[in-house]
Amino acid sequence: MLAIIGGTGFNGIHGFTEYGFKRILTPFSKNRVIIKLYSKKSTMVAVVSRHGKNHHIPPHKINYRANIWALHAIGVESIIAINAIGGINPRAEPGAFIIPDQIIDYSHGREATFYEKNLDQVTHIDFTYPFTEELRQIVKDAFYASNKNSKVKRLLFDNGVYGCTQGPRLETVAEINRLRQDGCDIVGMTAMPEAALARELKLEYASLALCVNWAAGVTDEILVMDTINLIAKEGMEFVSDIISEVIKQKFQT
């Protein structure tokens, strides 16, 4: 089964009907993880809202372990994470899409592993390539197929380094300069520890990121939240098309 971890503005999958939901109890919270189920014929897709139903959970307070554990518990094998990000690389302009292939983690204090209690031995995972390449390629192909059929043509940056910061505040100019020097192309707040936890449970994982603003200091433009929200709204409509195409290519039964 495919799962979508939805970020800011993601509201559903074109062509799919909301079938119901599951409330999954996990070892990592007293609160159950709410997983929406969408269906089309015999194909089922699970969707988790990363920031909660009312978008009230900030990035550093998300229970990443509970979300990933719950998806694994219902039989999910592949995850596409939807991320709203800021652009550092000139190619990652507002409105463009990015399918990152690497991560640098600047977050701190988050519960970042399943392997920390009642262990027989210390467990290390191979995280050389944090995103599943086969799934990345499927998302890439789905983007191009969707873009071909779209009246509005969108840009794709099909690799890049995702710098994951702590949030919830946005970054300073000096911090973005550091991220650029470190090799980051985009900046967001939610890819870690999500990607690492998926790897620990042997789940395929890829990110489809939408750039909603230039990162601090990249241009002289002043951040306007109404503009960011508009880019996110329009971009997420297209994300829904891409996900439908992904399902058609790999998961349709």
Image (cartoon, rainbow, N blue to C red):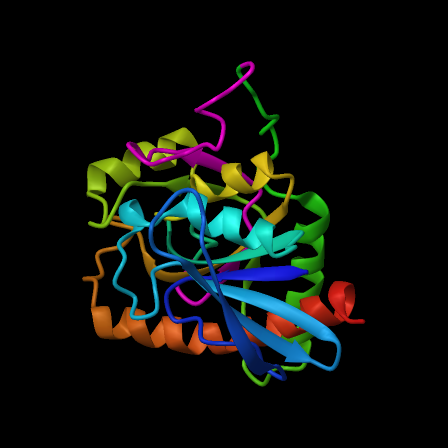
Question: What is the magenta range?
Answer: 93-121
The residue positioned 65% from the left and 44% from the top of the image is: 132
Position of the N terminus by quadrant:
bottom right
Report whether 103 appears left or right of 150.
left
Report whether 133 appears left or right of 62.
right
The residue positioned 45% from the left and 48% from the top of the image is: 26
Q: Is residue 43 above or below residue 4?
A: below
Q: Main secondary structure of the magenta part?
A: loop
Determine the image quadrant of residue 76. bottom right
Residue 70: % across, % down = 51, 52
Residue lying furthest top in this view? Answer: 121
The residue positioned 77% from the left and 67% from the top of the image is: 249
Q: Which of 161/82 is in front?
A: 82
Residue 73: % across, % down = 58, 51
Q: Which of 150/241 is in front?
A: 241
Report whether 140 appears left or right of 11.
right
Q: Which of 125/233 is in front?
A: 125
Position of the C terminus by quadrant:
bottom right
Residue 80 visible (yes or no): yes
